[in-house]
Image (cartoon, rainbow, N blue to C red):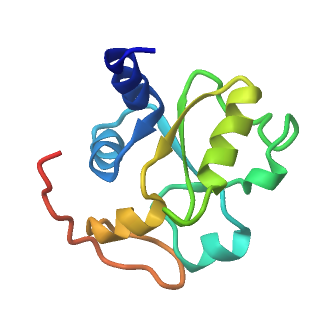
Amino acid sequence: MDQLQFYRAKLEYETDSWDLSESLNGGADVVVIDARSPQAYEIEHIPGAINIPHRTMNADTTAHLDREKLYITYCDGIGCNASTKGALRMTELGFKVKELLGGIDWWCRDGYETQGTNARAGKAIVCGC
């Protein structure tokens, strides 16, 4: 793989907070999946995200999902790989998937709103990405 293919592939399989926010606000056909535990999801999650822990992803738990949509998986962030495991599992199940860089940690760092018992108001920083 040359450099050009590598960077195109990264953009095909990864997204950042800014691009996800733009997709959600622009009405894109995107579904956000929190791949963490139900307890972590209840504490704080991206608005509109659904919770399917990566360990429970299988044909039965994803049967209700539309295979035509794009799914964005996320987890805690840099020190967690639940989003990667979730993206892999969803791909194995035949879904189109991207992984959110930095997870909810970077989502919060970039100032986006969250929901849950520790919900935060949105004060998004325009990063220029």
In the rendering, at what x and y percent does residue 125 appear? 16, 64
Q: Please state which of residues 113 and 94 is positioned toward the viewer in this rendering.
A: 94
Query: Residue drawn 60% across and 51% down?
Result: 83
Residue 4 located left or right of residue 58: left
Instruction: Evaluate whether residue 68 shows in this view.
Output: yes
Q: Is residue 56 left or right of residue 53?
A: right
Give residue 10's position: percent from left, percent from top: 41, 31
**Nearer to the camera, 128 or 50:** 128
The location of residue 87, given as percent across then percent down, is: 63, 40
| In the foreground, 122 or 85 | 85
All told, the count of numbered labels is 0
| Residue at image point 52% right, 74% down | 44
Q: Is residue 63 above or below residue 68?
A: below
The quadrant holding residue 57 is top right
Residue displayed at 28% across by 38% down: 26
Residue 34 visible in the shown view: no
Q: Is residue 125 left or right of residue 58?
A: left
- The residue lying furthest to the bottom in this view is 118
Image position of 79 with respect to 44: above or below = above
Q: Is residue 95 above or below residue 105?
A: above
Seen as rendered, the residue at the extreme front is 2
Question: Quick one: quadrant of the C terminus?
Answer: top left
* Residue located at (33% from left, 39% from top): 23
